[in-house]
Amino acid sequence: MSAACLIRLARCSGPQVGRSGLLQRGLLPLPFQQDSHLHFTQRQLYTPSGKRYSNTRFDSDGSGTPTTWDSFGIWDDRIDEPILLPSSIRYGKPIPKVSLSKVGCASLIGQRKENEDRYQVSQMTDSILYFAVFDGHGGPEAADFCLKYMEKYIKDLVTEESDLEVVITKAFLEIDKALARHLHFSPSVNAGTTSTVALLRDGIELVVGSVGDSRAMLCRKGKAVKLTVDHTPERKDEKERIKKSGGFITWNSLGQSNVNGRLAMTRSIGDFDLKNTGVIAEPETKRMTLHHAHDSFLALTTDGVNFIMNSQEICNVINQCHDPKEAAQRISDQALQYGSEDNSTVIVVPFGAWGRHKSSGPSFSFSRSVVSSGRWA
């Protein structure tokens, strides 16, 4: 669709144009339903949903699987979303709205005594969606602090800075300092947390920042695209920084490397007793432009999932699911079935190509390690 065509639509429509409006103009075949925004601040579990049947010509056999694609070739009938008209005009192509009600989230305690994982999904500003997972260790204090304040720090910064990579970096460093002040009166607490944050602006600009070993992954054309790299002592650059700062690396009986024999990551928020040994809170960031014709979903996962399933396995399992809520629950369940003992948390955010790239079946590796990951030696 040309920008000129979208501008003509803007003159007679609101900020979001649904398929019904485009149907009257012969551009799209199906109606959209606009959903309200939700803000998740508590852990929620979703049970798998059953098949949804349709009586449209896109699902004439009632199987729940669409038999054709719309005229743009970018939306599966199962994720029915309106077009973000201002963004579509700005970028000169149709961009679907991502509704928070469609996002799937799940968090399981596993074999641990306490679930120290936290996650959050929200409409941060009119144009920016916020997704985050925090995997706490040494207690939930650091993860709870990030859950409560990370969005606020980022929201304040975006009013002054347009570069979202800069915003995320500043927010991570500032919240780390704020946590240090908060825990100053509890010197016996050595809590820390991973932090993986994704910001989606205008439905097309995706920026991710991360410290620790929680991950973000994009599914493009059915293939997993890693958006984060774990901060572990095995990484040469991370190991060198630790050693230059006066820290040292040890390995436990399971072959896991740790900073000063304690922490299995080289970057985190918190862990203030290890800051002088090179453990930092500065995130690595990545910016992506979404292609809704090919990009199916974004997945954020904690190490209870990551250390037992690789990115492509996660991608394949999600691609077999009917909706993101079912997918999130299935991933967390799958991690437990494969032997994970850690807390497992996942967020699945659907994009334009949701459901388009189906996987033939789940992959399984007999060489999979069933040893649970642990940050503490």
Image (cartoon, grey):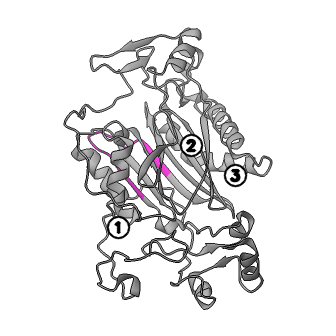
Magenta range is 105-119
Label 1 close to label 3 by CB (< 8 Å)? no
**Magenta stretch: residue 74 in it?**
no
The residue lying furthest to the bottom in this view is: 24
As rendered, which of 275 and 187 lies closer to the eye?
Answer: 275
* Residue 16 location, quadrant: bottom right
Q: Nearer the viewer, mark 1 or mark 3?
A: 1
Q: Which mark is residue 146?
A: 2
The amino acid type, in three-letter code, at marker 3 is: Lys
Q: Would you place residue 51 above or below residue 108 in this image?
A: below
Relative horizontal placement of residue 316, taking residue 203 as reference (left or right): left
The residue drawn where x is 45% and y is 34% is: 213
- Identified by mark 1, the residue type is His
Left or right side of 21 for 249: left
The image position of residue 214, as x and y in percent, is 46, 39
Per the image, the residue denoted by label 3 is 155
Contact? badges 2 and 3 (CB < 8 Å): no
Residue on which the image places disc 1: 322
Q: Tag 2 or tag 1, which sits nearer the N-term?
A: 2
Which quadrant of the structure image shows residue 186?
A: top right
Q: Secondary structure at mark 2?
A: helix
Q: Amino acid at mark 2?
A: Cys
Q: Closer to us: mark 2 or mark 3?
A: 3
Q: Residues within 10 Å of mark 1 (few under 14, many from 20)?
A: many
Q: Residue at x 60, y 87 (%)?
A: 26
The quadrant of the image that shows the C terminus is top left
Q: Earlier in the sequence, mark 2 or mark 3?
A: 2
Q: Nearer the viewer, residue 17 or 126?
A: 17
Q: Helix, strand, or loop for circle 3?
A: helix
Q: Position of residue 284 (x, y in %)?
A: 59, 34
Which residue does the image show at 47% across and 32% down from the upper left? Answer: 230
